[in-house]
Image (cartoon, rainbow, N blue to C red):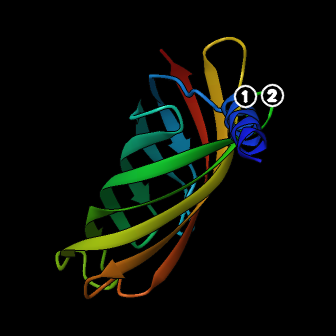
Amino acid sequence: MKRLAIILFVFTAYALEGHAQTIAENAIGLRLGDSDGFGTEISYQRALGDNNRLEVDFGWRNSKNFDAFRLTGLYQWVWNLDGGFNWYVGAGGGLAQVDFDDNFDRFDDDSETYLYAAGDIGIEYNFDFPLLLSLDFRPEIGFGDYNDDVDFDIALGIRYQF
């Protein structure tokens, strides 16, 4: 019985290791999209292990009523689906600065700085050459006068891996 337990343990460990996923050490590119208007983020990912990474995004958002600059940091876990397809989840937060355009009085603009918490779930494809495409959904909860509710951010990521 003891021998059978050891064999099962070794077989299970080998099977789990066979599905282990290694991700690119570094990836940099753009994350395009938003829920309030078209926005762009410069995105950097740094591997912290075989299946987890840190993502830092600096972006700007614009609409007819405001312009915003944002800095987001996320810790992500990555799992392989099949071949180059991966899915990932993450959690983190960020800091934003929003400048509002008052349409009634051009000289009376308001601005606000606020914090937000963010989650992240997405799917990505890792090509054989150093290109990574991703599509993710990032719900955010703001903590400020302007943004004190939930925002749903959807974006396409295009990154170069090195």
Residue at x 48% of width, y 41% of height: 52
Residue at x 36% of width, y 71% of height: 117
**What element does badge 2 sit on?**
loop
Q: Does 74 appear above or below 10? A: below
Lateral position of residue 47 relative to residue 17, left or right: left
- At label 1, which amino acid type do we have? Gly
Q: Could you say where residue 98 lies in the image, as x and y percent from the top left?
A: 27, 68
Q: Could you say where residue 6 lies in the image, as x and y percent from the top left?
A: 69, 39
User: What is the spatial separation of the Cα atoms under label 2 and label 1, in whole angstroms?
Assistant: 13 Å
Residue lying farthest to the front in this orientation: 1
Residue at x 80% of width, y 28% of height: 83
| Labels 2 & 1 near each other (Cβ < 8 A) | no
Pointer 1 residue: 18
Q: Could you say where residue 10 lies in the image, as x and y percent from the top left?
A: 69, 33
Q: Give residue 9's quadrant in the image.
A: top right
Identify the disc placed on residue 83.
2
Lateral position of residue 53 relative to residue 11, left or right: left
Q: Give residue 43's quadrant in the image.
A: top left
The answer to whether residue 150 of the structure is visible from this angle is yes
Q: Could you say where residue 44 lies in the image, as x and y percent from the top left?
A: 40, 34
Q: Nearer the viewer, residue 21 or 125?
A: 21
Comparing marks 2 and 1, which lies closer to the viewer?
A: 1
